[in-house]
Structure formats: structure tokens, C-alpha cells
Amino acid sequence: MDNLSPFTSDIRACLDGLGVGHSHRKYSEVGQKDLEACDKVILSGRRKNSKEINAANSRIVRYCYENGKPLLGICYGAEIIALTLGGSLRRMPSHVQGYFTLAVTERSDLTENSRELQVYESHRYCVARLPENFKSQASSEGCAHEMFSHASKKIFGTQFHPEKSGRDGIALLKAFSML
């Protein structure tokens, strides 16, 4: 789902490069039939705050959670997963942007046996408290929950942008596409 992120075209290019079929919908175009028809959902980041984007994304998060639909939230997508399901955010002391190394703290269906990830980040907020039944899987000096997942559902969040993170990001998107 396109939340008007400047990186949505990168997500699509990564999926195309992996040979993963996909549909692209703007946040305001996603209806119940779209959700029922898809196998998985990816929520992109966003450029600016919007009540309409928040409402549309929260509806999709709840649908995926209640119906067992695999969901990957990227940057803002991760933040709205956390907020919708009972977590919280905090503002970063400054805008985080650039390439960083993350410590993988717990194995995930998306990270296999990686101990660290090289990733691209661009955000002003981070998940401060995870919702109930979620676990942190990667951290950085500035953010304890760079990557997280639900304990039993296929719901994942990344504060970073896998679509801009080279080999490690491509591997993560490939793993998600194979769930």
C-alpha cells in the first residue's frame, strides 16, 4: 500500500527484481475486496502526517491482524502497526537518515541467521513500546525496536527501509514474499 512515500517505487522495483507479483494501491484506494484478494500486505512509509492515511492504515492493520494476513510495515508502516495494536512512539532527538548497522537480537522468519543488518533509515520517530505479544528482533543505539514481529502471527515492522538497504533489505523482502 502506497502511503505517498518517496520510496514506494523502490519497493515495487525490489519486488519486480525478485519476480514477485504484486498490486499497487494508494492508501485511499484500498477496499475490503482488495484486502480479501491479496496474499500479503506491505505498508510503505509516508512523507507527511495525515489523519486519512492513519485511518486507512489502521483499518488495514486490524484486518490483517484479525484475518491472519501476513503484513510488513516499513518505517511509518511499522509505527502504525505499533500504534494501532497498543504500542507507542517517541520522537527521535534528531532526524535519523543514512546507512546504519543493526544488531539482530532475535531470529525472525525475515532475518534467518543474520547477526546484524546493514540498513537505510530515514525517520523522526521510533517505536518506544511494543504492543502485547510482539517481540523486538533488531535494535540500534537510538532505537530498541528497529525490527519487530508478533509472537504467533505473520506481522512484522521495520523502522528502516528494506527497499533502500541493498542485499540485506532484498533478502528481507524475499523472505516476506515467501511466507
Image (spheres, helix red, strand yellow):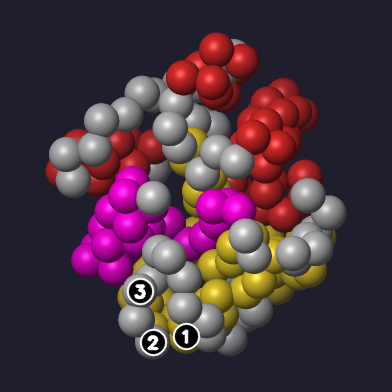
Looking at the image, is mark 3 or mark 1 earlier in the sequence? Answer: 1
Where is mark 1, residue-wise? Answer: 103
Looking at the image, is mark 1 or mark 2 earlier in the sequence? Answer: 1
Looking at the rendered structure, the kind of residue marked 2 is Arg
Residue 54 x, y percent position in the rendering: 72, 34
Looking at the rendered structure, the kind of residue marked 3 is Glu
Q: Nearer the viewer, mark 3 or mark 2?
A: 3
Residue 134 x, y percent position in the rendering: 69, 65
Q: CA distance from mark 3 to mark 2?
A: 9 Å
Q: Provide the secondary structure element on which disc 3 rests.
A: loop
Q: CA distance from mark 3 to mark 1?
A: 13 Å
User: Is residue 148 one of those drawn in magenta?
Assistant: no
Where is mark 3, residue-wise? Answer: 112
- Residue 43 visible, this orientation: no
Looking at the rendered structure, the kind of residue marked 1 is Ala
Question: Which sits in the foreground, 129 or 63?
Answer: 63
Q: Provide the secondary structure element on which disc 2 rests.
A: loop
Where is mark 2, residue-wise? Answer: 115
- Residue 172 visible, this orientation: yes
Residue for point 39% across, 37% down: 8
Q: Nearer the viewer, mark 1 or mark 2?
A: 2
Question: Which sits in the foreground, 42 or 63?
Answer: 63
- Rendered view: 169 above or below 62: below
